[in-house]
Image (cartoon, coloured by chain):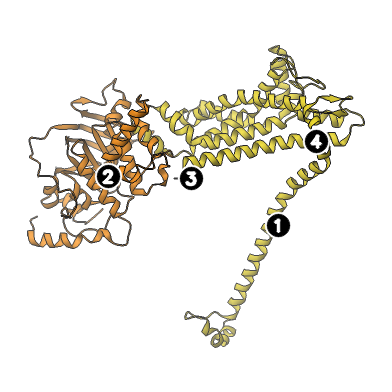
Chain colours: A yellow, B orange
């Protein structure tokens, strides 16, 4: 191996002033470069694969559902046993449920997250709370549905209603908001807290005027994740809020509503000879709502970061 | 130890160039000699030698000790700081000088696991006495940190932060405070036309002066500075030092520094800390020319640290 290299030394000498490289090592390096190219190619392909499901799903929905979308579809109630007509009550219901669940989850979740990050001392109680949050996040959504049914619908006598559904969905997404808030608050540099306290600000002032603004982009991300999830879940509202068919808007928080995911479920399983266009159109509207809310979050967050300036430190 | 004044001056002159070297750190190679303040044109002339007895005590500690958990960081330190003077605290890393500084405005309490014993008198009143609100102490004893730590807000909102928390709401009043503080911190001319732009867009030296302005905006009586120039280049360091000389007319300044040239240049009195104890304390000129304790001499001549 070395002798082969030594023989080639003369030809390799002009390449540089350093010790020449034996042929075997040069071959090895060429092989390494080859490996690198292969590895890069594989990773690139895998990254490309990530796009396939999203593009596939959206493409399928657009191709199949777009023909169903019309002004009437978006603004009218269903007709003909939901085989035709529009889905406006379902859109409105989903928006109501999202709004209601946010009213539950955002104040509680942000407060809880700030408490865990800023005030909680490392006691047994704190550890129990954290454990509870983590486990709540792992409870299947249908269990939330059953829980909401027995607590809100029956025990608190709210009936199947926007109220009961919002509370159930709110509880379901609460851990998401708590975890996002805590994480975002922890990422606010300690030096900012110290600067505030050294100016004679109280702890609460520091949390309210330094930690909360600094954590806002992260909190917002958590809220939007929660909203997307609340908008898309079927199981928690199936027993607590959703009406099979209700061609009008709820008149009070204690009325049931139609909702997009449940409507989709009904269209797919209960309605005989439903037009697949209506189904796919409904799904397209739901997906568009969720993606749009994600987009809004991304824009808001980047604007907020720009306003905070500098980006880091 | 006594030195020939002419050779000392020559050595001091030779040292003058070192801080402008290519390295960004303001701390040059271990100084072989006692460093004197450098006479530099355009700088505020150094203070007149302080008459010893006349000065009024602004803040003093009595048998102050601080522990991190069970580890003592400060042991039994008794020291007095004079009004409208700059006092430098020097010593090797980990000697407790920063911990000591934070004890003076009760900022150690922010760090979990610290315990403080002893007393600190601000204008004769013990700030650790029961019933004293640490929030009020910190308003009166301001602090500038080692690394510039502006909030990610605008320049204006940074300076207005303290006054707002203390109840100032009128915009014109806030504006007046911001202008006055930025002028005091010698930053006004550079930022007056962009008060609404993010503070984090400023250079490191400007950020540190902004932090000084922010601290001044709540009208503290004492200003604690924890190595305020250690993250800055020599030019920015010079500006901060000039600024300190201006500020001492209205404030009592205590500065922790690693840089002995800096201590020599700016301070009236110097305290030397080692292993959590105050080894020596006295007028800066005396400390740097005739240290009484052999450990002080060993440190300032660069034999350790």
Which mark is nearer the camera, 2 or 3?
3
> Can marks 4 and 3 be said to lie on one chain?
yes
Q: Is residue B280 left or right of residue A37?
A: left
- Residue B95 visible (yes or no): yes
Q: Which residue is tagged 3?
A: A311
Asked if the residue under mark 4 is in contact with the one under mark 2, i.e. CB atoms within 8 Å, the reply is no
x then y, percent, for residue B289: 11, 52
Q: Which residue is tagged 4?
A: A69
Q: Which residue is tagged 2?
A: B95
x then y, percent, for residue A245: 82, 22
Q: Which residue is tagged 1?
A: A45
Q: Which residue is at 38% across, 41% downward?
A: B149
**Distance of mark 2 from mark 4, alpha carbons?**
73 Å
* Mark carried by residue A108: none
Which mark is nearer the camera, 4 or 3?
4
**Distance of mark 1 from mark 3, alpha carbons?**
31 Å
- Mark closer to the chain start, 1 or 3: 1
């Amino acid at each position: 191996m070395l002798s082969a290299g030594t023989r080639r030394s003369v030809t390799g000498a002009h390449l540089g002033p350093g010790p020449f490289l034996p042929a075997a090592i040069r071959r090895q390096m060429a092989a390494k470069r080859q490996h690198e190219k292969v590895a890069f190619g594989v990773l690139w392909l895998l990254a490309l694969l990530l796009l396939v499901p999203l593009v596939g799903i959206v493409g399928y929905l657009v191709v199949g559902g777009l023909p169903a979308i019309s002004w009437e579809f978006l603004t009218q109630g269903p007709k003909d046993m939901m085989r035709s007509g529009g889905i406006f009550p379902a859109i409105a219901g989903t928006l109501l449920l999202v709004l209601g669940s946010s009213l539950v989850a955002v104040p509680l979740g942000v407060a809880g997250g700030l408490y865990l990050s800023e005030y909680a001392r490392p006691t047994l109680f704190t550890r129990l709370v954290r454990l509870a949050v983590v486990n709540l996040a792992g409870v299947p959504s249908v269990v939330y549905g059953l829980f909401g049914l027995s607590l809100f619908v029956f025990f608190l006598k709210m009936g199947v209603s926007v109220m009961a559904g919002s509370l159930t969905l709110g509880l379901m997404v609460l851990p998401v908001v708590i975890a996002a808030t805590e994480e975002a608050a922890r990422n606010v540099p300690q030096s900012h807290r110290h600067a505030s306290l050294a100016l004679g600000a109280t702890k609460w002032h520091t949390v309210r005027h330094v930690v909360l603004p600094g954590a806002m982009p992260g909190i917002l991300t958590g809220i939007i994740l929660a909203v997307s999830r609340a908008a898309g879940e079927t199981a928690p509202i199936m027993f607590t809020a959703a009406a099979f068919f209700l061609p009008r808007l709820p008149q009070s928080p204690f009325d049931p509503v139609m909702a997009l995911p449940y409507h989709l479920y009904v269209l797919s399983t209960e309605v005989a000879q439903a037009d697949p266009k209506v189904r796919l159109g409904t799904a397209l509207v739901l997906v568009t709502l969720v993606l749009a809310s994600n987009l809004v979050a991304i824009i808001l967050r980047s604007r907020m970061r720009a306003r905070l300036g500098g980006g880091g430190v | 130890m006594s030195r020939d004044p002419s050779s000392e001056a020559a050595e001091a002159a030779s040292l003058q160039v070192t801080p402008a070297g290519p390295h960004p750190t303001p701390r040059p190679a271990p100084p072989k000699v006692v460093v004197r303040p450098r006479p530099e044109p355009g700088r505020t002339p150094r203070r007149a030698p302080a008459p010893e007895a006349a000065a009024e005590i602004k803040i003093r500690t009595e048998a102050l000790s601080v522990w991190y958990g069970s580890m003592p960081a400060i042991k039994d330190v008794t020291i007095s700081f004079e009004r409208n003077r700059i006092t430098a605290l020097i010593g090797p890393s980990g000697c407790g000088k920063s911990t000591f500084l934070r004890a003076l405005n009760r900022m150690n309490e922010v760090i979990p696991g610290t315990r403080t014993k002893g007393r600190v008198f601000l204008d004769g009143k013990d700030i650790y006495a029961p019933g004293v609100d640490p929030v009020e102490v910190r308003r009166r004893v301001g602090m500038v940190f080692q690394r510039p730590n502006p909030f990610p807000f605008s320049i204006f909102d940074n300076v207005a932060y303290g006054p707002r928390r203390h109840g100032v709401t009128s915009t014109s009043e806030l504006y007046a405070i911001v202008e006055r503080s930025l002028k005091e911190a010698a930053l006004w001319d550079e930022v007056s036309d962009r008060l609404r732009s993010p503070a984090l867009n400023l250079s490191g030296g400007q950020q540190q002066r902004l932090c000084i302005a922010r601290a001044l905006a709540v009208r503290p009586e004492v200003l604690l500075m924890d190595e305020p120039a250690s993250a800055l280049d020599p030019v920015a360091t010079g500006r901060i030092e000039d600024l300190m000389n201006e500020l001492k007319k209205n404030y009592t300044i205590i500065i922790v520094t690693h840089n002995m040239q800096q201590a020599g240049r700016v301070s009236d009195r110097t305290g030397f800390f080692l292993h959590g104890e105050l080894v020596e304390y006295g007028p800066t000129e005396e400390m740097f020319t005739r240290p009484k304790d052999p450990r002080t001499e060993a440190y300032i001549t660069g034999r350790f640290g």
